[in-house]
Amino acid sequence: MNGKSISIQRQAMEVTMAGLLAAFSAVVIYGSLQLNSGWSSTGPEAGYFPLRLSVLLLIVSVLLLIQAVRKPVQDEVFVTGEQLRRVMSLFIPTVVLAAAAPFLGFYVASAVFLVYMCRLHGHFGWGRSLLIGVGAVVVLYAIFELWFNVPLARGPLEDWIDTWRLAA
């Protein structure tokens, strides 16, 4: 990278976020207009509150966008490349956890996530990382599945454990 460090300027981030908020508001407004968004004899219809709230959100986002554009350009850094890398080292595994949980099951995905985080960020050895990952998941399984009878997202391993447990 020819010696330059990557950074994102604060003003660029403010303009981007205001634009994304305006786009989100526009999508909600469009969806609300597809529904009945008035007041009926029984009260507000399905699109009533989403329409009004998203119009307010659109107004605020446009005001934020105007404010961000009108502000004199400064070299104020929102995030440096190193800070962004550190945030992504937590964010990406969390997204992978959320994406994997429906397929692997909550417990297996969480155990893998915890072991990975203990190794990468905690700098723990394999034994300690496995103990924390598996131990936390066993405690969560006991609390949710056995104590409260609240099943979480299941995968093949949880189904096998339940089959084994119910057969005993």
Image: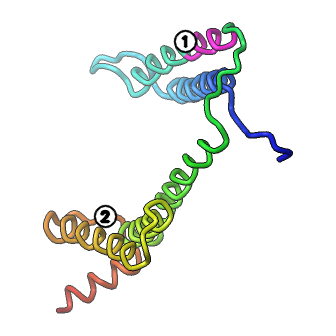
Q: Is residue 138 above or below residue 56?
A: below
Q: Is residue 3 above or below residue 7?
A: below
Residue 21 percent location from the top left of the image: 57, 25
Q: Is residue 74 above or below residue 13?
A: above
What's under tag 1, amino acid-wise?
Ile
Choose between 165 and 116: the one closer to the eye: 116
What's under tag 2, amino acid-wise?
Leu
Residue 125 percent location from the top left of the image: 43, 74
Choose between 5 and 96: the one closer to the eye: 5
- Residue 67 is one of the magenta-drawn residues: yes
Residue depicted at 36% across the width and 65% down the height: 153
Residue depicted at 39% across the width and 21% down the height: 49
Q: Is residue 81 above or below residue 151?
A: above
Instruction: Tell me the crowding category of disc 1: few under 14, some 14 to 19, or many 20 or more residues within 10 angstroms, Cα based.
Output: some
Of labels 2 and 1, earlier in sequence is: 1
Taking the image as shown, residue 159 lies to the left or right of residue 33, namely: left
Taking the image as shown, residue 66 lies to the left or right of residue 57, namely: right
Which residue bears the numbered disc 2? 152
Furthest residue to the right?
2
- Residue 120 is one of the magenta-drawn residues: no
Residue 19 quadrant: top right
Q: Secondary structure at mark 1?
A: helix
Choose between 9 and 98: the one closer to the eye: 9
* Circles 2, 1 touching at the beta carbon (< 8 Å): no
Residue 47: mark: none
Residue 71 quadrant: top right
Residue 120 percent location from the top left of the image: 50, 64
Which residue bears the numbered disc 1? 59
Spatial distance from mark 2 to mark 1, Cα to Cα? 40 Å
Q: Secondary structure at mark 2?
A: loop
Task: Give the extent of the magenta segment.
Answer: 61-69
